[in-house]
Image (cartoon, grey):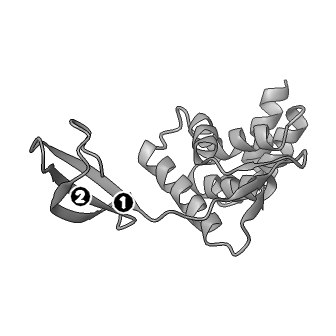
Amino acid sequence: MLCPFCSHPNSRVLESRSADESSSIRRRRECLECRKRFTTYERVEFVPLVVIKRSGKRESFDRFKILKGVTIACEKTGVTRSQIEDLVDTIETELQQRALREVTTQLIGERVLKSLRELNEVAYVRFASVYRQFQGISDFVEELGRLPADHMTRAKLEDILHLETQ
């Protein structure tokens, strides 16, 4: 580990502890040359996932793309950054634990939708509208009809939709 201050290759570990719910190790180090202290994090490196896009093109898995899409869907919904990070961490972990190293965008999208549906219905519908490429209001109505009845009765849903179309 190179010192970030003087680039000396040797340092000593002063303290180690679990970080990020034990998914990484935080280490406080001291450079043996300049004596400045710095922090490093160690985490398990997974075999890279390959994502198969709708077009058939393959590319490396990029966690940031999921994070960006979920963040946009959750804007002004009251969903915290921590909840978004947890959702993305959970999905990434599930994908990494799969035996197959290739995953389709469809599988990723459906997994995101499942998590958002449980977290926030507005974010769920927003994400679904982009992911499923809604073409009009009928697509929204159809998707809203799939939401669980315990959150909103069909009668309330029909009243809301009826008012919006007038």
Q: Are marks 1 and 2 in contact (CB under 8 Å)?
A: yes
Foreground pick, 115 / 85: 85
- At 89% from the left edge and 49% from the top edge, which residue is drawn? 56
Q: Is residue 127 left or right of residue 15?
A: right
Residue 57 position, x and y percent, is 85, 46
- At 52% from the left edge and 32% from the top edge, which residue is drawn? 76
Q: Which residue type does callout 2 highlight?
A: Arg
Secondary structure, mark 2, is: strand
Image quadrant holding the C terminus, namely top right
Can you see residue 46? yes
Residue 27 circle label? 2
Which residue is the extreme one toward the bottom?
99
| 17 in relation to 70, above or below | below
Residue 23 position, x and y percent, is 40, 65
Q: CA distance from mark 1 to mark 2?
A: 8 Å
Residue 71 position, x and y percent, is 56, 38
| 35 in relation to 99, above or below | above
**Residue bearing mark 1:** 42
Can you see residue 147? no
Foreground pick, 85 / 29: 29
- At 67% from the left edge and 72% from the top edge, which residue is drawn? 98
Q: Which residue type does callout 1 highlight?
A: Glu
Instruction: Classify mark 1: residues with Cα within 10 Å, few (<14), some (14-19) or many (20+).
Output: few
Residue 112 position, x and y percent, is 67, 54
Q: Is residue 123 left or right of residue 38?
A: right
Which residue is the extreme one toward the left?
35
| 39 in relation to 133, above or below | below
- At 36% from the left edge and 60% from the top edge, which residue is drawn? 42
Instruction: Classify mark 2: residues with Cα within 10 Å, few (<14), some (14-19) or many (20+).
Output: some
Q: Is residue 4 left or right of residue 93?
A: left
Foreground pick, 83 / 59: 59
Sequence-wise, the earlier of marks 1 and 2 is: 2
